[in-house]
Amino acid sequence: MPEVLVVLGSKSDLPIGEKAVGVLREFGVSTEIVVASAHRTPERVKGIIEGSDAKVFIAVAGLAAALPGTIAALTTRPVIGVPVSGKVNIDSILSIVQMPPGIPVAAVGLDRGDNAALLALEMLSLSNPSIQKRLVKYRRDMAAQVERDSEEVRR
Ligand code: RP5
């Protein structure tokens, strides 16, 4: 069973889900992607969440993005919502951010599957020192890249 389950509202969300899975695999964390829509297949969403022992859920959805909130309503495990861009980009962001009191969803930026994975890793790192170490290295590598970029631009 995966530690982080990525749920897509539609197969069309796959490129965003793949960003999350790529980062999680880079960190050696087990993950899986499934498609289940809050609107088209509510019973399927329920079955998947109730049958999963994942520690964190990443829910990727666009338009009236009910999926992250629906998953959050079914579990007390953390849910990270990733809004997907479309013709109107504010719709999915607000659908994920504006949860009613009592049922929180963590939201990352539009199409930011990579940040959703990093946030999930930060959650897992609270009880996993090896993930924590790798996160510190990831930040260090990023900072080194900025310095290399600066040097390149300066020249
Ligand atoms: C949402 O509607 C999905 O998450 C997707 O982002 C969007 C469009 O879905 P499709 O029409 O491509 O299946 O529920």
Image (tube, rainbow, N blue to C red):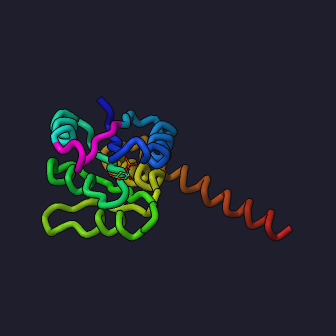
Going by the picture, which residue comes out furthest to the top? 1
* Count of numbered badges drawn on the protein: 0
Magenta stretch: residue 38 in it? yes
Which residue does the image show at 42% across and 68% down from the upper left? Answer: 88
| Residue 121 located left or right of residue 101 | right
Looking at the picture, does residue 135 appear above or below residue 11? below
Q: Nearer the viewer, residue 92 or 136?
A: 92
Which residue does the image show at 45% across and 61% down from the upper left? Answer: 86
Q: Nearer the viewer, residue 17 or 137?
A: 17
Image quadrant occupied by the C terminus? bottom right
Magenta stretch: residue 150 in it? no
Which residue does the image show at 26% across and 52% down from the upper left? Answer: 67
**At which x and y percent is residue 72?**
20, 53
Q: Nearer the viewer, residue 61 or 117?
A: 61
**At which x and y percent is residue 38?**
23, 49
**At which x and y percent is residue 8?**
35, 45
| Residue 72 located left or right of residue 115 | left
**At which x and y percent is residue 7?**
32, 43
Q: Nearer the viewer, residue 91 or 123?
A: 91
Which residue does the image show at 34% across and 62% down from the upper left? Answer: 107
| Residue 34 located left or right of residue 12 | left
Quarter-wise, where is residue 10 in the image?
top left
Image quadrant occupied by the N terminus? top left
**Magenta span of residues:** 34-42
Q: Main secondary structure of the magenta part?
A: loop
Looking at the picture, does residue 136 appear above or below residue 153? above
